[in-house]
């Protein structure tokens, strides 16, 4: 429904140009309560000779506050990875479990979207058994700070497309 010219109550909104949808609770024109936000889009890299394209599907189902992921929720990434846990201001924050696309899992605390790694047995961070495997796929943006991502968005995307292309050609 609507109140004071803003979305309020339960509803669905679609953004066709970006491939996004939100189905859930609204308060004062923003997602607030429980809902599902999904991104379905085709990305293309026309800068290379192969004119590669990638279909993405990310989704988040969980709690929202004032338009942001906040509270408990599950984020499913296009590469098959998932995060089940607590969120604060659109970032992984608090207790959670990140499952990598190869099935390895980090269970523990997250702060500002990053896992808190600890010395085994000190009780401050993640699972003692978590160790990166030699067959994980690398997402370049995971290695970059927010400032670097903003500054280097185009080169990073191009590099990511190139890495994915060569990875798929080797299979």
Image (tube, rainbow, N blue to C red):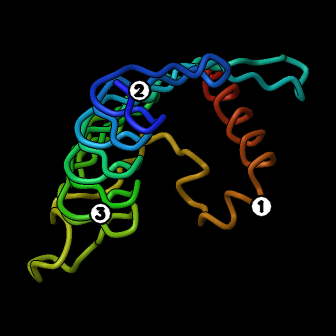
x, y percent for residue 78? 46, 28
Q: Which mark is residue 166?
A: none
Q: Under tag 3, what secondary structure?
A: strand
Callout 1: helix, strand or loop? helix
* Above or below for 98 versus 75: below
Say left or right for 131 vs 39: left
Give the CA separation, mark 1 to mark 3. Answer: 24 Å
Q: Earlier in the sequence, mark 1 or mark 3?
A: 3
- Tell me the quarter of the image containing the C terminus: top right
Residue 164 percent across, percent down from the top left: 64, 30
Residue 93: which numbered mark, if any?
A: 3
* Mark 2 or mark 3, whichever is nearer to me: 2
Label 2 close to label 1 by CB (< 8 Å): no
Vertical comparison of 140 with 126: above or below: above
Q: Residues within 10 Å of mark 3 (few under 14, many from 20)?
A: many
How far is disc 2 from disc 1 in space, using C-alphas? 28 Å
Q: Residue at x 33, y 69 (%)?
A: 111
Residue 104 falls in image quadrant: top left
Residue named by callout 2: 22
Q: Which residue is at 60% across, 63% downward?
A: 146
Residue ID at (11%, 83%):
122
- Secondary structure beneath dot 2 equals strand
- In the rendered image, which quarter is residue 82 located in? top left
Let me know if residue 171 appears in the view: no
| Image spot of residue 96 (x, y percent) | 20, 54
Position of residue 152 in the picture relative to residue 115 (left or right): right
Mark pair 2, 3: CA separation: 22 Å
Determine which of the numbered discs, if any, sits on residue 151 in the image: 1
**Can you give x and y, in whole percent of width and height, for residue 68 in the image?**
40, 50
| Residue sitting nearer the eye, 5 or 36 | 5
């Amino acid at each position: 429904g609507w109140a004071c010219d803003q979305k309020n109550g339960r509803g669905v909104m679609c953004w066709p140009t970006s491939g996004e949808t939100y189905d859930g609770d609204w308060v004062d024109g923003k997602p607030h309560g429980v809902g599902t936000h999904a991104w379905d889009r085709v990305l293309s890299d026309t800068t290379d000779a192969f004119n590669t394209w990638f279909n993405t599907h990310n989704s988040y189902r969980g709690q929202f506050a004032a338009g942001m992921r906040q509270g408990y929720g599950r984020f499913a990434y296009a590469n098959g990875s998932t995060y089940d846990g607590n969120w604060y201001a659109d970032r992984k924050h608090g207790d959670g479990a990140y499952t990598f696309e190869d099935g390895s899992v980090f269970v523990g605390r997250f702060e500002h979207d990053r896992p808190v790694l600890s010395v085994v047995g000190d009780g401050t961070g993640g699972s003692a058994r978590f160790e990166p495997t030699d067959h994980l796929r690398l997402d370049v943006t995971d290695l970059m700070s927010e400032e670097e991502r903003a500054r280097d968005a185009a080169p990073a995307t191009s590099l990511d497309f190139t890495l994915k292309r060569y990875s798929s050609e080797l299979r």
